[in-house]
Image (cartoon, rainbow, N blue to C red):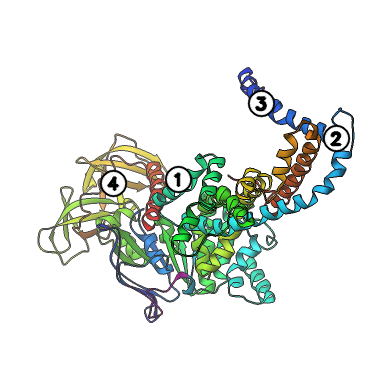
Amino acid sequence: MKKRSFLDTFAAIPHIVWVILFIIAPLVFVVFFAFTDTYGNFTFDNISMLSSYAHIFVLSICFALIATVICLLIGYPLAFFISQCKPSTQKVIIVLLMLPMWISLLIRTYSLMALLDNGGLLNSLFEVIGIGRVKMIGTSGAVILGMVYDFLPYMVLPIYTSISKLDPKLLEAASDLGCSNFKTITKVVLPLSAPGVVSGITMVFVPSISTFYISQKLGGGSFDLIGDTIERQFQNVSTYNVGAAISLVMMILILISVAIMNKFSDDGGEIIV
Amino acid sequence: MENKKNIIELKNITVRFGDNDTVLDNINLSIGDGEFVTLLGASGCGKTTTLRLIAGFLEPTEGEVFFDSKNMSGVPPYKREVNTIFQRYALFPHLNVFENIAFGLRVKKVKEKEIVEKVQSMLELVNLKGFEKRQVGNLSGGQQQRVAIARALINDPKVLLLDEPLAALDLKLRKDMQNELKALHDRTGITFIFVTHDQEEALSMSDTIVVMADGKIQQIGTPTDIYNEPVNAFVADFIGESNILDGIMVADYKAKFAGHTFECLDKGFEPNEPVDIVVRPEDVDIVPVEKGMLKGTVTSVTFKGVHYEIIVDIQGFKWMIQTTDYCAPDSVIGLFIEPDAIHVMKKSIYSGLIGDYSSYSEEFDELSIVDEDEKEETIEEAKEV
């Protein structure tokens, strides 16, 4: 094997420092706090008291799952549609799709709030056309809408990437071998774009399950999700340890779900973005 | 062969991409049942487009495609009794060998037992027994080629379309596959429509060759016809090596070129009509200078194994001659041409475009063909979108 040059080693140093400072060290702290009390003594209390948060975990998982499924149902057909457009049109749609991603998630959530608010744009419109005001902020629908709105591009882009990488000859081959357009999609396009679907699901599910501002802003305080709970624990020094324990469990949950998802994609599943 | 009915007929086919980019220009072609037909031409001549019309991936701008006397316009590929073998095979990467071959039957919802039986017999036919569980990505080019053949043939197509199927294989394998395809054609009796830019492949495999250039059919005929009686300078140049000279048909059986009047076997031209003359390199005899009809200076000699390929300068025109006798460079030799070695053709738009052998390089030819093919494909794909 070629000996690594000084430059190679040197180039990696900033990254290594970054990883140690901002990834490994925080992880160690999370684990440390999760297994200690406020005085730094080792304890399992934080973990064992998590059972009282079970309903929050279940609710968060449900919300994230629903948002992910909706994103998939909207995102897959959209990604397929984009991939069938002219190359120039594809570029325009992709830029349009990515445009919101250049704006802070927080700002997007606030703008959605302005739309859905009791005195917001939509409700003013409803009143004008005679439907009357509808309470939207504070409903589970608003929270899920927020998740779908914020994370949809993360579903569409990887799926689009994997569909557009398909050799058009494969679609012709399917058609040649007797597949109608619909069968071509189910028998060739779907299985071959599975890796894109897997990374899309992962990229929507993970931020959805850990979000706190969406549920705070659009849930109007009626929903307590894991993200909110963790945030609350960390606002008070005395509950750091419980927050760390919840974080730890959530990380493990996410790791498990990502591992399960990757099982579904072929060959150990590389994630494409 | 003549009594057989035509399985495919193309009538007045024109294909245009955009307003003024004509890819096929008023093509008429009849293909008999059970024939091995080769569409031969350089890249961009429209041969692949013709194949795609028959497969149904493309609808003609004008004209009709008939299959078994039925008009195929508007019939999608999946309802046509043809199957295609694609240039780079287009095997499904998510399926193993068995499932790739079984694909067409699965779509038709054939019973599992029948599928297993048919796939097994196909695997036997293409010599891939024991490969059922292999992933197609791990197969060699030749093996992928066989899977593609089996995947197409299992559907019992009436016509098999082959789009430069051997282009991606190395020379040795290509020769083997040529023989296998030919044998497969004889055994199955299916009509094969084969697209290639390789004239040697076309000559050795086909019943009928269709030479295409610039979106038009130049000549249709048996390999021997095409080789011995090319209709114009393009065909003569494209099929095999040939010396193409400007000449004048002085009278019936008398052709004048290279400053000499030769006896020949051609007639029916106007007196003193300007014509193109073809003399194949292997038909020229080398004789002592004093006995020669023409004399020239040898400018280069290349050993080719079976023969020497020598370039002879005769009054500034470089001839290629294939001979088993060695001639030293710079020596002066005489040439003798038998009447039946001379083929006279009418002038065409290709006259004068094809020069002599002064800048001849075989390697360069090969390379540029492959390059342009890739280009042609991308251009065609872009146009279809």
Q: Nearer the viewer, mark 4 or mark 2?
A: 2
Disc 1 element? helix
How many angstroms separate mark 4 from mark 2 (CA)?
Answer: 103 Å
Residue toward you, B178 or A77: A77
Q: Earlier in the sequence, mark 2 or mark 3?
A: 3
Subunit bearing disc 2: A
Q: Is residue B220 above or below residue B352?
A: below
How many angstroms separate mark 2 from mark 1 (CA)?
Answer: 46 Å
Marks 1 and 4 share the same chain: no
Query: How far across and down, in percent of the image, does residue B63 sit?
Result: 30, 71
Q: Which residue is mark 2?
A: A35
How many angstroms separate mark 3 from mark 1 (CA)?
Answer: 31 Å
Q: Residue at x 42, y 74 (%)?
A: B75
Q: Which residue is mark 1?
A: A95
How many angstroms separate mark 2 from mark 3 (CA)?
Answer: 25 Å
Dots 2 and 1: beta carbons under 8 Å?
Answer: no
Subunit bearing disc 3: A
Disc 3 element? helix
Q: Which mark is residue B287?
A: 4
Q: Earlier in the sequence, mark 2 or mark 1?
A: 2
Instruction: Characterize the local packing of mark 3: few (<14), some (14-19) or many (20 or more) Cα atoms within 10 angstroms.
Output: few
User: Can residue A154 be seen in this snapshot?
Assistant: no
Residue lying farthest top? A6
Marks 3 and 4 share the same chain: no
Q: Which residue is mark 3?
A: A18
Mark 2 is on which residue type? Phe
Horizontal arrangement in the rendering, residue B222 relative to residue B174 (left or right):
left
Marks 4 and 2 share the same chain: no
Task: Read off the magenta span.
Answer: B64-77
